Image (tube, coloured by chain):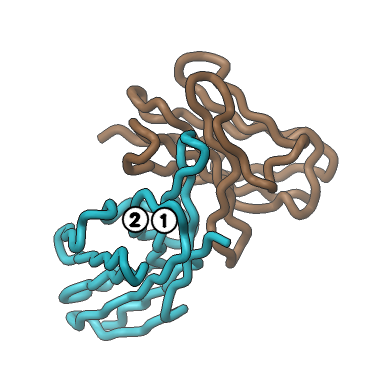
Amino acid sequence: KNQVEQSPQSLIILEGKNCTLQCNYTVSPFSNLRWYKQDTGRGPVSLTIMTFSENTKSNGRYTATLDADTKQSSLHITASQLSDSASYICVVSWNYGGSQGNLIFGKGTKLSVKP
Amino acid sequence: EPEVTQTPSHQVTQMGQEVILRCVPISNHLYFYWYRQILGQKVEFLVSFYNNEISEKSEIFDDQFSVERPDGSNFTLKIRSTKLEDSAMYFCASSLESRAEAFFGQGTRLTVV
């Protein structure tokens, strides 16, 4: 069964600190992996998107890694800010039958950045 | 910056009533999606739409649901006879290609009473 598992479920860090969020997936065939940031009550906003051949991708203070062999990804946030408080969702896209793929969402990691 | 817009932001309806949720995708995008998120749970895929027809749908998307692109700009989700369990945040998304980044709207919070 196609699944995306994230850890930890929630995380509290102090402003200015770094943190790393984890994502494991069992999705086949794999198309790409995305990290989204979702503020409470809002739609997800894309941070990074990586295909099979990409190992790392950065977007400002966000750096995502992908190990397609072990089917693991991480999102590293550097020098956290209060505005980083949100849910971070790992999403894996897959394709079947030659038609367009759809997205499988993880449950997200709820990050709280405290002053 | 172009964005996906959804209306209304919040809809309250009585059980058994029909609701239509509206979305205006980004203008040059070709692929359109509906997702839902029950409070406290993960986002779930409902349906994808391309070239004026459904390309994929999940088990959630049963006969009570339908989608339509009535004109060149709007993309709608209709729930024919709402149930209490349909209460959720419904997100519309669009992308230029099927594997490209999907842009999400702000969501419509549907409350069925």
Q: CA distance from mark 1 to mark 2?
A: 6 Å
Q: Which chain is drawn using brown?
A: B
- Would you place residue B9 above or below residue A27 in this image? above
Of residue A76 and residue A1, the one placed in the foreground of this image is A1
Most distant residue in the top direction = B71
Residue at which label 2 appears: A34
Q: Is residue A17 left or right of residue A33?
A: left
Q: Is residue B12 left or right of residue B72?
A: right
Q: Residue A66 at x, y = what percent?
A: 27, 65
Q: Quadrant of the N terminus of chain B?
A: top left
Image marks 1 and 2: residues in contact by CB distance under 8 Å: yes
Label 2: how many residues lie within 10 Å, few (<14), some (14-19) or many (20+)?
many
Residue at which label 1 appears: A92
Question: What residue sits 31% from the left and 82% below the top?
Answer: A114
Question: What residue sits 51% from the left and 31% below the top?
Answer: B23
Of residue A59 and residue A67, the one placed in the foreground of this image is A67
Most distant residue in the right direction = B16
When asked about the image quadrant of residue B101, the answer is: top left
| Callout 1 amino acid | Val
Q: Which chain is drawn using cyan?
A: A
Instruction: Report how many numbered discs are placed on residues in the image.
Output: 2
Question: What residue sits 64% from the left and 53% below the top?
Answer: B88
Q: Is residue B80 left or right of residue A11?
A: right
Q: Chain of mark 1?
A: A
Label 1: how many residues lie within 10 Å, few (<14), some (14-19) or many (20+)?
many
Of residue A58 and residue B98, the one placed in the foreground of this image is B98
Give the SS element for disc 2: strand
Task: Indicate which disc, 1 or 2, sits on the residue closer to the N terminus.
Answer: 2
Q: Residue A70 at x, y = what percent?
A: 34, 71
